[in-house]
Image (cartoon, rainbow, N blue to C red):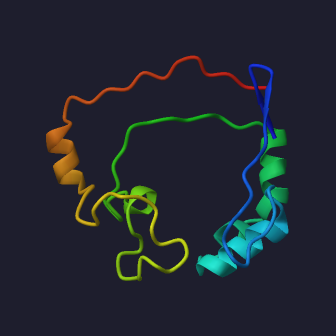
Amino acid sequence: LYVQNGKVIQNSKVSVPGITGDSITGAYCDAQKSVFGDTTDFQNKGGLAAMGKALNNGVVLVMSVWDDHAANMLWLDSNYPTDAAATQPGIARGTCATTSGKPTDVEQSAADATVTYSNIRFG
């Protein structure tokens, strides 16, 4: 759960068949990868235990503006991979066209883009 301005916000429940729960556990990660047909790259690198160890050792927050020459950012807000049916779980990720996000288009149309990161907190 989350608390913001004194208000408790419950975590959302998963509504995908084959995945249950409302927290990230090893079983949740395994089920998610299985249902969506993804590779188990996270688990192969040690999963939550390895991530916990890294966090205990200290990590650095890095933020940047970037584009994606491999997949045109379609994994973020379109149908991806583009050769799979949008009705398949995990493929429809947003409303952007599968022809969008080409780095050459983005770099030309937003050549002067800037970003300001502020009010970053941790705890």
Identify whether 65 is placed above or below 104: above
112 horizontally vs 84: left or right: left
1 horizontally vs 80: left or right: right
Could you say which quadrant of the image residue 111 lies in?
A: top left
Q: Provide residue 54's location: percent of width, then percent of height.
A: 78, 47
Q: Provide residue 121's location: percent of width, then percent of height.
A: 68, 22
Q: How many marks?
A: 0
Residue for point 14% across, 43% down: 108
Identify whether 115 is placed above or below 102: above
Q: Provide residue 122's location: percent of width, then percent of height.
A: 73, 25
- Residue 122 or residue 41, whichever sits in front: 122
Residue for point 74% across, 67% down: 29
Residue for point 46% across, 62% down: 93
- Residue 57 or residue 96, whichever sits in front: 96
Judged from this view, the residue extending furthest toward the left is: 108
Q: Provide residue 97's location: percent of width, then percent of height.
A: 27, 62
Could you say which quadrant of the image residue 45 lies in?
A: bottom right
Could you say which quadrant of the image residue 123 lies in?
A: top right
Question: Split into 4 quadrants, where in the image is the N terminus?
Answer: top right
Residue for point 21% across, 29% down: 112
- Residue 80 or residue 40, whichever sits in front: 80
Identify whether 119 is placed above or below 17: above
- Residue 90 or residue 67, whichever sits in front: 90
